[in-house]
Structure formats: C-alpha cells, structure tokens
Image (tube, rainbow, N blue to C red):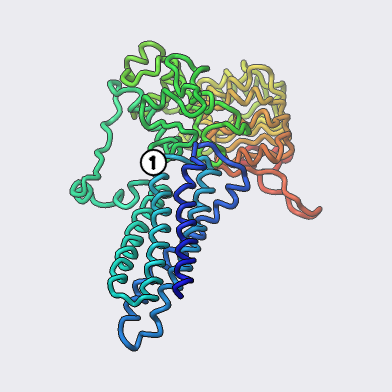
C-alpha cells in the first residue's frame, strides 16, 4: 500500500504539473482553432458534471464511515476521489480545447480555467494525503486531508461560478432580484437616462448596439481575437491583428465597420452567422457615427448638425421615441378618384379591405394594360400611406418602378412572383420597415441578393420557389432572418399538394398568396 501511495503521488504530481503548465505552453490568444478541436472541446459540457457530483458526495461517505458500523465504507472516498480526478483532468483538457477552438480568451475565462485546474490539483493532493493516512493511520495526517478536501470544494465552487457567468452572464444570479436587494449587495446598476438630443451618440446609440451584438465575445469576460469593445480606448485600438477597431472619420480604415459590412458567407463577417445580425439601420448608425468623427462625447444634436441623412434621421427619431406622423384619414371621395383614374388609364384595380378605409388598400395589377412604370405607381401618391398590399404577379417592371414602391411606407405584403426584378432592385426595398410577406417565386434572384434580403428584418414570410438562390444561400438567410419563415421547394411525390404560397395561379390576387 505504501508503494502504491508513492507511485500515485508521483503520477499525480506529473499530471498536476502538466495541467498547470498547459496555459503557459499553449496560451489562449483569442484565435479560433481547427474544427476537430472545437468538436472534441464541446464534450466539456458533458464531462464537467461527473467530477462535480463525485467530489460532492465524498464528504458524505467520510461521515458515513466514521461510526464502527460504517467501517466497510471507509475505502469508498478514495475510490470516488480517484474517479473524480480522472474526470476532472478530462474536463480541464476538453474545456481548454473548447476555448482554443472557439477562439475565446479574457479575464473571466482565465478565472474559470484556473478554477478548474486548481480544483483538480488540490483533489490530487487530497487523495495522496488520504492514501498516506490510510497507510500510516496517523490522526495528524487526517487533518491536512480534510483541509485539502475543503479547499477543493471551495475552488470548485469558485470555478463553477465563473463558468456559469461565462454561459449566462455575470449578472445572472442577481439580475432578477428586487432593486433593494441589489442595492444592498452593491450590484445594482441604475438604468441609463432617457435618450435625448443632448445624449452622446456613443453612449446613447452606438454602445447599446455593441452591447447587444458584440460584448458577448469582445469584452472583459471574453476577448475573441484579443479585441475588447467594452472600453472606448480598446475599441479604437483593435485586437491581435493590429488593425484599428475604429478610426476617427474613416469608414474603410475601421475594422469594426468593415467586418459588419462583409457578405454573410464571408468567414470574417461579424457578428458570425450563428449570432444575431446587425440590422441595416444599426449598421448605418455606426457608419454615421464613424464618419462624423467617432467621438465619445459628441451629442446627437451636434452630429446631426454636421450630417443627418434622411435614413439616419428616421432611425434617430425612432430611438428618441418621436412618434410617426399619423396619416390623414382617407376620404371615400379621394379613394374613389384614385381608383377610378388608375382603372380607366391602366386597367389596374385598387380595392379596400373593408368598408372602413383605415383597414388599408390593396393593389391588383393582373388586368394592367401596360408594363408597370414609376409614373404609373406615382399616381397612387394620394393613397400612398394607406396601401398595405400590392400584387405584381407576372408584371413587367420598367426601370424605376421598384424605387417607387418604397414610397408606400405601410406596405406589408408584396407579390413579385415571375416579374423581372433583379438583385439590384431589391436593395430599394430594404427601407420598407413594415413589410411582412415578400414573394419572389420564379424570379432571377440569386445568391447576390442574400445580403440584401438578410437586412429585411421585418419579414415574417419569404417565398423563394424557383429562384437562383442556392441551398447555402437559404441557410445563410435562415440564420440572418430568425423570425422569418422561408419557403422553398421540398422533395415531394407527384401527388403532393402545392404548398400554400408556393405560386399563385395566373390572375390570382396577392391576398391569397401571402
């Protein structure tokens, strides 16, 4: 038994030394590793439960072995400790592989890593001391064993807490506590003041965007690419690549803007495809701030005086809580005049959803006598704010027609199936913030339109039957438009019924193909 204790002690010392050396020999630099490392590292989540459970029941069996009738249970803690150590070593290695493979780094990750390593090393020491006590039967040896066992439980608690903070956030334990409790604990963070024209653009607009989309990977807790965005100076400095994160007044030189502007299928796009993509509005606001000098202190009013494009103004007004101008009620006379004019001139039908004109109007072009032009659509200007649905199925769209569609801000359903719309035309539709259903069946839309479609965050249904968008493009869209149902052809037998919304029959109204 004495020889076994010595051998296990030497072996344990070697394992402990290897674990302690691991972060120094293979430092985490915030760069992602090979896929096989990620695949193996993900078993860390499975393995970590075993050492925790085994270590927690060791004190239970120690107490059960104290009475004379529990003598048979006295060897059990050693067995449990041995198993716990084996699983703990595996957990540490797998966790390290997970961090390396995902390109994770940062203070919180380091705390979690060292919590696991310290726990494992102290467990090894506790087992060796217990085996020495079992061999010598000296009571003086049992006290150090209990001390190391207690220390291992304490370090386990410390390391596990930091691991949970990595997964759930550092405020997970107290975020839902009453404010008075949070204040007593000293963890209460007062909400930011209401946004106003006097608010700094960075603190009031830009930082909340970064907080939502970027801080989970680029903050004090986790520093992918050794790049932190949660402190202004570090945001400007950039990460391991040496490229500045933000350059005052220079969009092309600002790595942050470059990354958020990359195509979805680019490996360097940020946020990654599995994360929530920035909306076109959010990206535009970041670009506006950078072009305006990327100052930490400039206010909304000051930056607006320098430059305030229409799209930026609309976005800022929305953030400020300025309500949209309510359109004037549509009179039956005005509706009848426009409907009669476009029917007599172009054969286009304008219908009301109900007798209450405030329920909206829909445009039916199946009987149109000529291709749709911007001039034709411009004649709908008197009812533009009330138009909620347009059916352009199989219509020929003349240049400029799609741009005119953007002048219908209430539009929620747009049927463009089998039209001559192009990927370039789609870019004009990004500004339709209330568009919920878009049908592009049988058009020449291809993968070059994926980036544009991914910015249409308001969409809830998107029909892409018989388009040129590849399966990879469809998956990119599903990752970017998480709230949108994307309908594409599915393998089906000859008698399988056509899916709802797949393709309307000729002359069918958009009302039936949403």
Question: Quarter-wise, where is residue 75 in the image?
Answer: bottom left
Residue 20, percent from left and from top: 44, 49
Q: For mark 1, give the secondary structure.
A: helix
Q: Is residue 327 above or below residue 437?
A: above
x and y percentages locating residue 207 in the rendered image: 37, 30
Question: Residue at label 1?
Answer: 107
Q: Is residue 251 above or below residue 108?
A: above
Question: Residue 442, image x and y in percent?
Answer: 73, 35
Q: Looking at this view, is 288 or 501 the one in front?
A: 288
- Residue drawn at x 25%, y 45% is 187
Residue found at the far top of this picture:
306
Viewer-proximal residue, 389 or 8? Answer: 8
Q: Nearer the viewer, residue 510 or 361?
A: 510
- Residue at image point 30% right, 64% down: 147
| Mark 1 Cα shell of 10 Å, populated few (<14), some (14-19), many (≥20) | few
Q: Is residue 468 visible?
A: yes
Residue 303 placement (x, y as % from top left): 36, 15
Q: With 19 as the anchor, is 392 left or right in this view?
A: right
Outermost bottom residue: 69
The answer to whether residue 334 is seen in the rendering is no
Is 253 displayed left or right of 237 in the figure?
right
Residue at point 65%, 22% (across, down): 424
Quadrant (top left/top right/bottom left/bottom right) for the C terminus: top right
Q: How many numbered discs, if any?
A: 1
The residue lying toward the viewer, choosing from 27 and 175, is 27
Residue at the image point whose x is 34% and y is 77% from the top: 137
Please, which residue is most extreme toward the front here? 3
């Amino acid at each position: 038994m004495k020889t076994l204790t010595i051998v296990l002690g030497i072996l344990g010392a070697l394992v402990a030394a290897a674990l302690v050396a691991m972060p120094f020999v293979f430092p985490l630099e915030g760069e992602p590793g090979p896929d096989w490392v990620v695949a193996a590292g993900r078993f860390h989540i499975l393995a970590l439960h075993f050492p925790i459970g085994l270590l927690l029941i060791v004190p239970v069996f120690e107490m059960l072995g104290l009475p004379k009738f529990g003598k048979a249970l006295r060897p059990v803690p050693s067995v449990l400790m041995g198993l716990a150590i084996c699983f703990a070593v595996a957990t540490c290695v797998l966790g390290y592989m997970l961090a390396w493979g995902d390109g994770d780094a940062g203070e919180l990750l380091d705390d979690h890593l060292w919590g696991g390593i310290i726990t494992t090393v102290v467990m090894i020491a506790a087992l060796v001391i217990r085996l020495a006590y079992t061999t010598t039967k000296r009571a003086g040896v049992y006290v150090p064993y209990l001390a190391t066992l207690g220390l291992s439980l304490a370090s386990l608690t410390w390391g596990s807490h930091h691991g949970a903070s990595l997964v759930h956030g550092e405020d997970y334990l107290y975020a839902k506590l009453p404010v008075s409790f949070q204040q007593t604990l000293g963890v209460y963070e007062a909400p930011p003041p209401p946004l106003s024209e006097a608010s700094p653009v960075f603190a009031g607009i830009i930082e909340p965007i970064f907080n939502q989309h970027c801080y989970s990977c680029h903050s004090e807790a986790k520093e992918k690419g050794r790049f932190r965005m949660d402190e202004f100076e570090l945001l400007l400095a950039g990460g391991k690549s040496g490229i500045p994160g933000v350059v005052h007044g220079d969009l092309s030189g600002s790595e942050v803007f470059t990354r958020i502007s990359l195509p979805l299928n680019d490996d360097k796009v940020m946020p990654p495809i599995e994360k929530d993509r920035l909306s076109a509005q959010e990206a535009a606001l970041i670009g506006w701030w950078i072009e305006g000098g990327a100052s930490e202190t400039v206010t909304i009013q000051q930056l607006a005086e320098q430059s305030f494009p229409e799209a930026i103004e609309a976005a800022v007004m929305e953030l400020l809580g300025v309500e949209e101008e309510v359109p004037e009620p549509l009179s039956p006379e005005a509706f009848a005049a426009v409907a009669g004019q476009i029917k007599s001139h172009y054969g286009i039908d304008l219908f009301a959803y109900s007798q209450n004109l405030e329920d909206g109007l829909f445009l039916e072009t199946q009987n149109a006598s000529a291709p749709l032009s911007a001039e034709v659509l411009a004649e709908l200007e008197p009812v533009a704010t009330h138009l909620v649905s347009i059916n352009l199925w199989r219509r020929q769209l003349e240049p400029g027609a799609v741009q005119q569609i953007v002048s219908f801000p209430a539009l929620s359903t747009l049927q463009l199936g089998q039209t001559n719309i192009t990927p370039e035309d789609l870019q004009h539709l990004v500004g339709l913030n209330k568009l919920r259903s878009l049908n592009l069946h049988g058009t020449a839309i291809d993968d070059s339109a994926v980036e544009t479609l991914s910015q249409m965050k308001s969409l809830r249904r998107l029909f892409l039957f018989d388009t040129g968008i590849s399966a990879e493009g469809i998956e990119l869209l599903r990752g970017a438009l998480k709230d949108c149902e994307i309908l594409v052809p599915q393998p089906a037998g000859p008698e399988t019924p056509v899916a709802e919304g797949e393709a309307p029959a000729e002359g069918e109204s958009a009302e039936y193909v949403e």
